[in-house]
Image: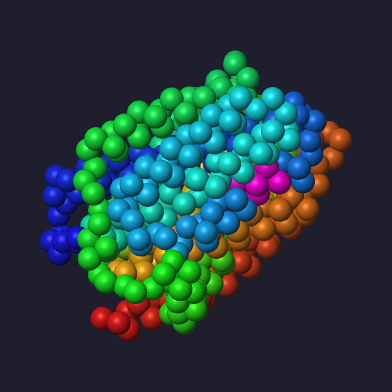
Amino acid sequence: METTTNKFTGYQAFIVAIIAILQFTIVLDFMVLSPLGAILMPELKIGPSEFGLVVSAYAFSAGASGLLAAGFADKFDRKKLLLFFYTGFIIGTLFCALAPTYQLLMAARVVTGLFGGVIGSISLAIITDIFAMQLRGRVMGFVQMAFGVSQVLGIPIGLWLANNYGWHSPFMLIVIFSILVGVVLLIFMKPINEHLKIKSDKNAFLHLWHTVSNTDYLKGFLGTVLLATGGFMLMPFSSAFSTFNLKIPMDQLPLLYGVTGVFTMVAGPLMGKLSDKIGKYKVFLIGTIISMVMVIIYTQLGVTPLWMLIVVNVILFIGITSRIISASALMTAVPAPQDRGAYMSINSSIQQLSGGVASGIAGLIVVQTPSGVLDHFDTLGYVVFVSMIAAAAFMYVVNKMVMGRK
């Protein structure tokens, strides 16, 4: 169970590393679709709305599986649960690597989402079981480095593979790497079953109902709805916006994502440590203000030189990373120990479903002209701006609730 010291033990350091690497594979599987958008849309003969549905398919299936798994999430050893869903994720990604058409790719994304969408919630439950609250900001900082690493290594490599060997090849690379991660997880992670010692006479469905109907938990769930909106709206169209609107050549996108990723990697642990030191909500608020300003600037850009876009992207992602890390650490304090698995699963489902709805709405707002240029991207920026204001207000309520328990 969790320790109360301010330093990681050797095993805790291993857990941070393996969960960060595991999250890297999950994040890359999702994020690689964004830069592939400029390749997939013409190759599969689909428009922004269909591409938005490909992104949404993963999110909706992930949301559904999280709800189905929630009642059982606290009934099993978390290591076994993690291995089960990670195996399914690998199989789903393999289907993506083999899919020859838009319809089969959509089906493969559904399978991947059914398994991959639950893994983040299981990982958060494991972190909450093993690490005390005063360490969780740092832990989330390192785990969120997965986003930066996916941009520094994963996305540039994925784009290079897609440009040279076809869009299927990045998914095959993820499959091979994920198998290696799964083997390490199987051999070296200890069972995580302390939560099973807390006796509960609730069956899976009653456990799910009690978790969903808990007033405190509902506050956390609503906060997640607002948090998920922004990222899912902008991210799926970022590569197409950069290529067609900002006139950044496709072969320069790996440099854009790579440089942004380096800064995100460095910022992650620093923001995590800062959130442990000055408070999770303070860091969240700072990150939100930065993100709001940069979203408006980013979505208003016209033809832009690469160096300027890199600067804008770096500042935007530092703001987004600060929000994700601080909010994730704060959310781990919401559930009671015996409800952690269920709460995290439901929370993950809500995040995925909200993101899926947001991505679908974004696909309806954005219109691609015959030349490839995306119209109404600035409107998308205003919607994200408003959602961030609402998220900041509601996270204040969640923070006040968590702090009131101390």
Of 365 and 341, nearer the camera is 341
- By secondary structure, the bulk of the magenta-drawn segment is best described as helix
* Residue 285: % across, % down: 45, 68
- In which image quadrant can residue 153 be found? top left
The magenta stretch is: 52-59
Q: Using the image, determine if residue 277 lies above or below residue 403.
A: above
Of 242 and 4, nearer the camera is 4
Q: Using the image, determine if residue 365 lies above or below residue 385.
A: above
Q: Which residue lies most toward the top here?
A: 164
Q: Is residue 25 visible?
A: yes
Q: In the drawing, does residue 48 fall left or right of residue 334?
A: right
Q: Quadrant of the N terminus?
A: bottom left
Q: In the drawing, does residue 378 fall left or right of residue 399?
A: right
Q: In the drawing, does residue 100 fall left or right of residue 187?
A: right
* Residue 317: % across, % down: 49, 49
User: Which residue corresponds to the image point at 63% horizontal and 32% vertical from the top-left?
Assistant: 36
Q: Is residue 330 visible?
A: no
User: Which residue corresponds to the image point at 52% horizontal and 24% vertical from the top-left?
Assistant: 172
- In which image quadrant can residue 287 be found? bottom left
* Residue 331: % across, % down: 39, 67
* Residue 26: % across, % down: 46, 41
